[in-house]
Amino acid sequence: MPLKMNAVELMAYLDEVFPQVIDDFAVDRLAEMEVDLRLKVAERHLRPGGTVSGPSMFALADCSAYAIVLAMIGRQALAVTTSCGLDFMRKPEAGRDLIGKCRLLKLGRVLAVAEILIYSEGGDQPVARANMTYSIPPR
Amino acid sequence: MPLKMNAVELMAYLDEVFPQVIDDFAVDRLAEMEVDLRLKVAERHLRPGGTVSGPSMFALADCSAYAIVLAMIGRQALAVTTSCGLDFMRKPEAGRDLIGKCRLLKLGRVLAVAEILIYSEGGDQPVARANMTYSIPPR
Amino acid sequence: MPLKMNAVELMAYLDEVFPQVIDDFAVDRLAEMEVDLRLKVAERHLRPGGTVSGPSMFALADCSAYAIVLAMIGRQALAVTTSCGLDFMRKPEAGRDLIGKCRLLKLGRVLAVAEILIYSEGGDQPVARANMTYSIPPR
Amino acid sequence: MPLKMNAVELMAYLDEVFPQVIDDFAVDRLAEMEVDLRLKVAERHLRPGGTVSGPSMFALADCSAYAIVLAMIGRQALAVTTSCGLDFMRKPEAGRDLIGKCRLLKLGRVLAVAEILIYSEGGDQPVARANMTYSIPPR
């Protein structure tokens, strides 16, 4: 099943539906059923002590899973997150971007399931793991 | 097991460790093992269309669970979120605050587990459900 | 929204679709959107040391959520579990049945979400917490 | 970090702590931080219609994660499952074993986190996804 958008089209579309996207995220890699999304870590994503906040990691997982669903099914802004799980495993390294490596495990008619591993850029151990489920409305 | 902080002390402490707290959250009710935390919904919490964003709901769940752990064990800012699950069930009503009704199910020596139901203020059906697990470091 | 089955009809139907039900489970209480389901703990549910096994607790959570969905929507055996989360919080007491107190948080057209607290009979602290999501096929 | 047991030692130990193991499971592959565990599907694992039951898939995920934790840290039977999440994505193929491909994402002093993809033997699409967290007691 081929992609319906390339990385530029995807970023343009994400910017419409998640308007904070242009400032916060970048598509590092896009392939069938897979995307690497970068969170451009800035002051507003941090907790005291320099750790990236939980909501920022949630946003990266959510946005990467949403991105690959959209890239596969095309513009269908009504797809909604129905559930997720996250494990926070290591402290992100200060001053580094986070990369969400997202893989779509299922793209069904009504549900899509993705898994995401989040890394500090350059790190080889994931800082967090996530799974996200989306409901895809009938066209 | 009695509370170690009242609502005012809790808000003051949360403001140190989650500095956005004073603007975003308020303690509506605090009791042994239970807290109701309010997300004072503002423009920055919204998605296009007026829905409260997923990261904002995650932040409410996380902050309410963290708040009741702190209120029960006292100042111990190192407690860290280790895992969570969320189900998004209904669209929050536009222009209403969200209330996270949080109950601590377990407060062990090393792990705490909380469940949270999130409501639009005045609504009787939850918009989301969450569970959060915290690791409590040895003193 | 009223129940479409009483406890006897529900047990008869569960016995068709989960054939182990008659031996393993009993409906203790059934109300709109709520059921208390009992796991009649026997040797086959135990781990060495006398703890009820994880798969047995999963089965109790799954069966209780499935039961309340069926009791609310009527015979529709195709409803399928799509996702779940469990937290194991305390060791069940040896030689006691487990009670799954299940509440349906959402009963939508295509998805149902339930939360379950599992207790050792007579205990006042939950031994486990679960959430289950079901996909309801179009009729 | 090297393995502390080989596949034969691991099966022997699992058989002590999960006594149903010899009949139900086999280690297909064992490597640092990774194991492939086979559920030898038999009548008792099935639902009407020939699908492998949810509790059986939970048991496969749990047992594979437990197995790799033990293989990495050595005999420490007290390690306990603290939480898990599962997504059921496709119907397993009738008459085939299930393979749980498990990867340990974190092996900390007190917590271990694993992710598992479950396949019908010979299939290239996962039937389920799971994450399991274990608490490792101090020695």
Image (cartoon, coloured by chain):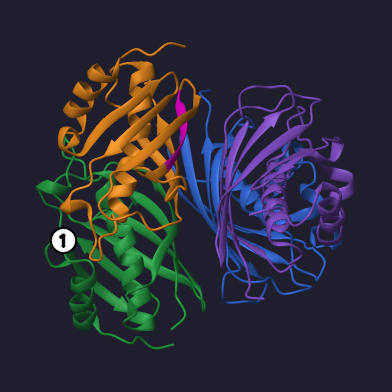
Chain colours: A orange, B green, C blue, D purple
In the rendered image of this protein, does residue B127 appear above or below residue B5? above
Quadrant of the image containing the N terminus of chain D: bottom right
Q: Quadrant of residue D5?
A: bottom right
Q: Quadrant of residue C47?
A: bottom right
Amino acid marked by disc 1:
Asp
Q: Chain of mark 1?
A: B
Side (left or right) of B19 relative to B110: left
Pinpoint residue B5: horizontal percent, then vertical percent: 28, 85
Query: Which contiguous range is marked in magenta?
Result: A110-117
Q: Secondary structure at mark 1?
A: helix
Pinpoint residue D38: horizontal percent, then vertical percent: 78, 38
A112 inside magenta stretch:
yes
In the rendered image of this protein, does residue D61 appear above or below residue A15? below
Q: Nearer the viewer, residue A34 or D119?
A: A34
Quadrant of the image containing the C terminus of chain D: bottom right
Side (left or right) of D43 relative to A138: right
Question: Going 70% across and 46% down the picture, which residue do you hit?
Answer: D55
Q: Does the image show residue C26?
A: no
Side (left or right) of D48 relative to D91: right
Q: Nearer the viewer, residue D25 or D50?
A: D25
Pinpoint residue D28: horizontal percent, then vertical percent: 79, 37
Q: Main secondary structure of the magenta part?
A: strand
Pinpoint residue B50: horizontal percent, then vertical percent: 16, 39
Q: Which residue is mark 1?
A: B24
Question: Going 69% across and 28% down the picture, which residue do you hit?
Answer: D92
Q: Does the image show residue A126?
A: yes
